[in-house]
Image (tube, rainbow, N blue to C red):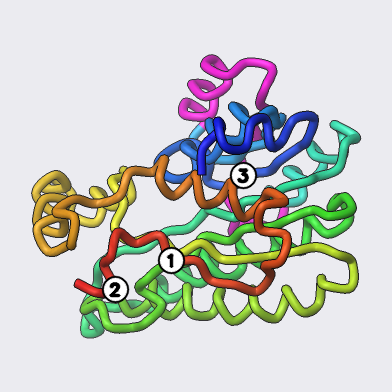
Amino acid sequence: MNSTANPNALTGRTALVTGGTSGIGLAVVHRFVAEGAHVVLTGRRQAQLDAVAAELGDAVTTVRADASDPAQVAALFDAVAARGTGLDAVHVNAGLGEFKPLADVSPADIDAAFATNVRGTTLTVQGALPFLNDGATIVVTGSTAASGTEKSFGLYGASKAAVATLTRTWAAELAPRGIRINTVIPGPTETPGLKGLAPGSGDALVQQIAAGLPFGRVLRPEEVAAVVLFLVSQESSGMTGSEVYVDGGSTIA
């Protein structure tokens, strides 16, 4: 889907993107702004937020927030309330993961994975509820790791499997309000997060993964953002509780 096929799909709308300062989240911010939305976006690093604000100006409102921190999530929704426009689209994208074999997993690792990916997602969707306008849509970023077959990625995969279950449940709960919620499931995507899984050799990791994929390359963040736009637009009005794979064929490789 592109802006030629669906020009200005979000004109006059307000969107929220968590984890919006890099990778897929940043690509979604750019796409939403291009489609006419004002975007409230979060990130944990002020310098990155400042860079997005300098680039996109009045089209965005930036809020420094860690999705796992209830007080910071509350401050985020104070900023949403201050705009006074409610929310028409929400992309819950903040998340983290790392490779760690079972033998090396610590209690702190367990807490960190579930705090951001499960608690953070839950707090964000919960916090958005009072601000969702009629017909609002939510997209949650899932992961192919939720299948639980990636070695040393069990904690991340388990947390994303939990999010998938929550999202399906929320779809049923929110349907009476006419609110849709779906999950986008990216495959390997060239982002700082992917490269960060192998500090010092991130480019080599990307090349290694790409060699095993049907197209011989990993995804671009913009390709995932195009599907997120589809899921928040009226083009997907018949979908809720769905999981949409944007994986470059990684599940068939």
Question: Which amino acid type is marked by label 3?
Answer: Val
Looking at the picture, how far across and down is residue 18, in whole percent? 59, 47
Which residue is the site of mark 3?
17
The span from disc 3 to disc 2 (Cα, nearest Å) is 27 Å
Residue 136 in picture, x, y percent from top left:
79, 53
Q: Is residue 212 left or right of residue 51?
A: left
**Disc 1 secondary structure class:** strand
Front-most of residues 123 and 244: 244
| Residue indicated by mark 2 | 251
Magenta region, main secondary structure: helix
Q: Nearer the viewer, mark 3 or mark 2?
A: 2
Q: Residues within 10 Å of mark 3 (few under 14, many from 20)?
A: many
Tag 2 and tag 1, C-beta contact below 8 Å: yes
Q: Earlier in the sequence, mark 2 or mark 1?
A: 1
Which of marks 3 and 1 precedes in the sequence?
3
Quadrant that contains the C terminus:
bottom left
Magenta stretch bounds: 46-71
- In the picture of the structure, the residue carrying the numbered disc 1 is 245
**How many neighbours does mark 1 have within 10 angstroms: few (below 14), some (14-19), or many (20 or more)?**
some
Name the kind of residue labelled 2 in the image. Answer: Thr
